[in-house]
Amino acid sequence: MSAMFGVFRREFASYFATPVAYVFIVIFLLLSGALTFYMGDFYERGQADLQPFFQFQPWLYLFLVPAVAMRLWAEERKSGTIELLLTLPVTMTQAVLGKFLAAWAFVAIALALTFPIWLTANYLGQPDNGAILAGYLGSLLMAGAFLAIGSCLSATTRSQIVAFILTVTTCFLFLLAGFPLVLNFFRSFLPQALVDGIASLSFLAHFAAIAKGVLDLRDLLFFALVIGFWLYAGALLLDLKKAD
Amino acid sequence: MIETDNLTRLYGDIVAVAGISFRVEPGQVLGFLGPNGAGKSTTMKMLAGFLAPSAGSAKVCGHDVETEPLAAKRTLGYLPEGAPSYGEMSVREFLQFIVRMRRIDPEQRRRRLHEVIGRLQLERVLEQPIDTLSKGFKRRVGLAQAIVHDPKVLILDEPTDGLDPNQKHEVRGLINAMARERTIVISTHLLEEVHAVCNRVVIIAHGRLLADATPAELEARSRYHGAVSFSAVSSLAAREALERLPVVESVEVDPLDGRITVFPRQGRQILGDVQALLAAQGIRITEIQLERGRLDEVFRRITTGPAAEAAA
């Protein structure tokens, strides 16, 4: 446990050791605001809720979260510190979890800093704060799922750019898994049952429910499973490809 | 203590380490010698628990690196090749990260950190990001993280690579100072390093162990072992007289500087005879030396000889 916390602490601090963290947070906040107020018609809708804010988050995450995740393992590989880290008394699970949680905590901070939007909604009207809280929870879970994908794909390469592109592409597929764009492709060679399975993996479908304030255990479980699966796959890949 | 049994590692179809067995006891400093790509680093990576052996086993202080990896990793300190460290951290932050990961008691942490920082003379750069340090300092930071928990077993992959002569001297002094009760394995390309720190040498090539001996034993395998070499004012006359000596096998003259090397017959001592003959002939010498043997020659012979070819 303390080994995992050690990894977490180092990783988390490393985000703030360079200007990257601050640049990321500023861009995230600017884009969140711009999308919410200009494209989301936050005022014009005349409703006190955060729907306009949450509806753009998957697309914002699509590019920003892979940027946070890409360095997780690719940089360790490139600099050779992976050898240092994994010869310290730490298990693979602790190392993978520690790093993932650090990245997740970092994104959580960026997300928490969007609170002025919430304050605005409360100033202008009486929104359902329970629903907003659920929306934030769903948003955080989705970010976690993106990060877990990024962590796994970052473990496959020494290049952060490659990790970034792979992660964006994979996340895009998962986002749109329920849409004809993706489904028609799979329908051409997979039986309908499998295509339905793929459709049910759509991040957007699961997120949309939570963002409306509907906390369904199945949606929560979905994201938890996605995170668990990709982290586990990442640990396996690291173990297999350590020598490369 | 380190024990390996038939330790083997494949990368795909390529055999990097082909069944190496050895044992290193506390108090020994084992030097790993071998050409590039011989399997030195791969062997060390397996000992340190980074790579899993494809076959065979390795034990560190009785803990198998595969079945009890955490226990094995706790007892050892490891300097990976190139001394990687987290460049954005300051030296102090980095070492604090290591002591936390090594779970050193909070009470002892301060003392241990103070000790390694002093030992490796890192005071001056403590607050600097590691990225901004010179190669020598980076290497010392790598050594500091390897010894900060006072490990029983030390595995150092090219600990003096890239250091200047003074820094090399310091690092060798450090290794010697730690050698007494610890088990130390170092890999190196530098044969002089073997003399300076190792009391045992293992030579590997093509993933096989080709020699396991003390530095003196290896030197004794050299054709130069027991030879006498000198520089004389007029070397031609000396050469013919020397060749007639019964204890002498052959005489060679270096074409560049005219230095004469006299090789003894098997197992004979010739220094006295050579000196007596030179004195009797009235040959003036400017300098004379009894050779211990040349490790570079032995190294070349072992790693390129018939045994090495059979291993390849």
Image (cartoon, helix red, strand yellow):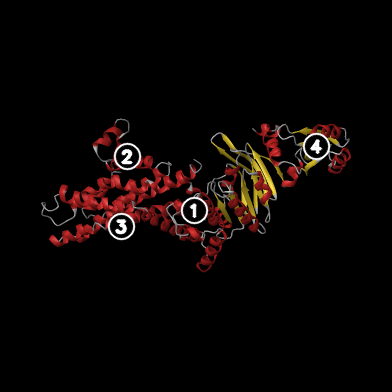
* Label 2 Cα crowd, 10 Å radius (few <14 / some 14-19 / many 20+): some
* Same-subunit check for callouts 4 and 2: no
Amino acid type of the residue tagged 1 in the rendering: Thr
Q: Is residue B289 above or below residue B148?
A: above
Q: For the point 50% across and 58% down, which residue is it? A: B98
Label 4–label 1 contact, CB within 8 A = no
Q: Nearer the viewer's eye, disc 4 or disc 3?
A: 4
Tell me the residue that label 1 is attached to. A91
Q: Whole-percent x and y of residue B184?
A: 63, 53
Pointers 4 and 2 in contact (CB under 8 A)? Answer: no
- Residue to which mark 4 is pinned: B262
Instruction: Tell me residue A165's x, y (percent).
Output: 34, 40
- Nearer the observer, A181 or A121: A121
Query: According to the image, label 2 marks what residue?
Result: A169
Disc 4 from disc 2: Cα separation: 73 Å
Q: Tag 1's secondary structure?
A: loop
